Structure formats: structure tokens, C-alpha cells
Image (spheres, rainbow, N blue to C red):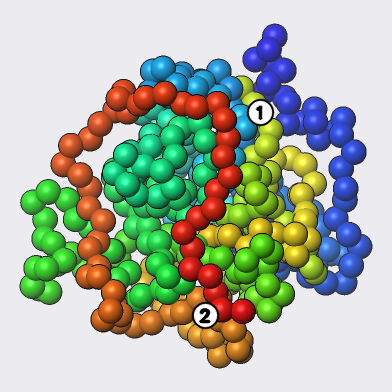
Amino acid sequence: MEAVLAKYENQINAFSEFLEDLPDVDEPVWILGARYDLKTKKSELLSDVRSRLWFTYRKKFSPIGGTGPSSDAGWGCMLRCGQMILAQALVCRHLGRDWRWDPEKRQPKEYHRILHCFLDKKDSCYSIHQMGIAVHRSAQMGVGEGKSVGEWYGPNTVAQVLKKLALFDDWNTLAVYVSMDNTVVIEDISKSLFLITSGESSPTSPLSQRPLDWRPLLLVIPLRMGINSINPVYIQAFKECFKMPQSCGVLGGKPNLAYYFIGFIDDELIYLDPHTTQQAVDTESGSAVDDQSYHCQRTPHRMKITSLDPSVALGFFCKSEEDFDSWCDLVQQELLKKRNLRMFELVEKHPSHWPPFVPPTKPEVQTTGAEFIESPDKLFESEEEFEILNV
């Protein structure tokens, strides 16, 4: 009986709770690069939002590392948001931005394969198990926030975790680039896109020996747009990011409350909220996933942009080199030339005063996460190592 109720929890809540409807305004709504007129395209807008993969807290999955937590309620919200921004990139990669989810229709096999990447089990490449253990290993190596599984993480830490896990994902061959010091370096991105496996060429090989195929790119830009709250001078540029066709959303929220932002209307952000605890879905490898609980069938949540915590991570997906070049042009035109105070910089060459850039490579030895140690119950706030933008 519990499993049946869990299956329909999303739909039951949609009708049992009082949900605030979208406002009746003349301003267009922007969702991940798509523009909607509320007066004429409201159903299309809601279909778009429902089609985004929605990852929430889960319970009753196998203990992380064998002895760790079996639920991420209370600490995994930013990890779930990280799953959502990555899932959006994979959907665009395999199904296209215009793909829509219809519960009454059979979904393509690529869709179910994407879902399998995020199931709550240790052998799913982007599961809560793999993400939690990746953060823990980073802490052991002195990287990141020094936190264990069971604690709250910020957007920059989750972005670094996605970059690490993508190295083990042979199906999607996705390159994840996380910018540093508010600066996107085109030269470093080019080096990151070389597909490197054992026996293949390296970035130091002669150009004629290097692989020439462009890998799909998830570009993540961690920023801190203020000290205690977002500086109003960045708001318009922040909104412009959601208008770009390459927009993959934003990781952010409030202290200890992470949300996945997918768009805006007027002065409000639209987001998917992971703070709903659902039962873990148990599906055999290769089979179709019972996907009802992976789509939010409620009116989208909204919050004032001014209420946003200044620590965020912007996400963009570029499927092709032409797509990336187009994004660079948009950044130059809409964010850099029009704004006196820039959210981030876009430069051609690796800064000479920086340490040499080393593209991430897949480790020779993979571990299962069985070495995971204790998980504390206490939650901690996340104050990340961001450079403060000049205000």
C-alpha cells in the first residue's frame, strides 16, 4: 500500500494543496531559453516545466556505502539540484530542448536510459550514492568544503562533483567545465573537450594526433553576486542568462535550502523544489523506469529575485562547437558590452598568472564507495570559497 501511495504522492499533493497560480501579467515568461506569453501559451509553458526531470529527497534506498544513510532528506537538496541541472543537459543532448514528456505516451529509450543514470543505487553514475561519496573523497584529499556524506553542500561543491563523475560516464561523453575566479577561459574549455581514454592521445600530443570531435559541453559558472544578498546591479544580467538558448538553469537558493532555477517572470524566479521526500524507485537495469514521480505536475514555484542567496552556479549546455560560439557571442553582446559591472569574464587565453590548466582525466582505478565512513546527523551551513565580485 505504501508503494502505491508513494507512486501517486506527486499527483495527490497537486490537488490537495493550495497552489499559487502564475500571475496575470503582460510580461513574458522565460524558461531555459524559451519565451512564453502567459495569455496565449500558458498550457505550453506548463508542459515545458512538467517535462523537466525533477529530483527530490528520497527514502528507503540502499544505505550509502553500505552503512551510511538510506535517505537524503534534510541534507541532499543541493545534490538533487545538481542532478537536475545535469539531467537537463542530458535531455538536450539526447532528446533535444523541444522534447516534451507525456505520461500517456511511450517515451524513447534514451529517456529511460537518462533516468537510469540518476536512480538511487550505487551503480548509477549520478546517483545520490555516487555524488555523496565523491564529495567525501574530495574532503579527504583537501578539496572543497571538507564535508562528509550527510551534510549540506553549496553550488560550487556540487559543480565540482559533477565534473568528477562525468569522467566515468562513457555513454554520454559529456565534458563538464567549472569556471574559476569568475572567469570562463575558452582555451581551457577547448582542452577539456578532448576525449581521452587509455591508449588515446593527450592534450600535449601534436595537433594532428588529437581527436577532433567536439564533445557536448556542460559549462558551470559559480558566482557570488554580493555579500549577504544579491546586488541589484546584477539582476538584469542574471535574468538575461535564462533567455539564452543554451541555458541549463541555475543552482542556488537560500542558506541550507537549495533550488533549481529554470526561468523568471518579471521580478520573480521560477524554480523546481527538491524538498519533497518520496520513496526510492527500484527498477532493474535496462528496464523502463516508473517515471511519474520524476516530473513535477504542480504549478511552478516562484520567489523574488531579491530573496536569492548571492552564491549561485550558472549552467549552460553547448551541444556543438557552433552552439558554444553562439553562446560566446551572446555573452559578449548581452552581458559584457551592455553592463558596467560584469557577473563574470570571458577570455580567450589562459591567464599567465594562473597555474597551468590540467584537463580532468579519468582515474585508472575505480572504487565502489564501500570505504565510506560515518555520516553525521548535524547539518552545517555552507560558506563557499568564492571570490567576491566588486560592488
Against 169, residue 341 (above or below) is below
Residue sitting at x 32%, y 61%:
215
What residue is shown with label 2?
Answer: 331
Identified by mark 2, the residue type is Val
Most distant residue in the top direction: 1
Against 35, residue 373 (above or below) is above
User: Residue 189 occupies which quadrant of the picture?
Assistant: bottom left
Characterize the local packing of mark 1: few (<14), some (14-19) or many (20 or more) Cα atoms within 10 angstroms. Answer: some
Can see residue 96? no
Residue 267 placement (x, y as % from top left): 79, 68
Residues at discs 2 and 1 in contact (Cβ within 8 Å): no
Q: How many marks?
A: 2
On the rendered structure, is 373 left or right of 315?
A: left
Is label 2 in a helix, a strand or a loop?
Answer: helix
Residue sitting at x 61%, y 36%:
56
Residue 192 placement (x, y as % from top left): 28, 64
Between discs 2 and 1, the one toward the N terminus: 1
On the rendered structure, is 192 left or right of 302?
A: left
Is label 1 in a helix, a strand or a loop?
Answer: loop
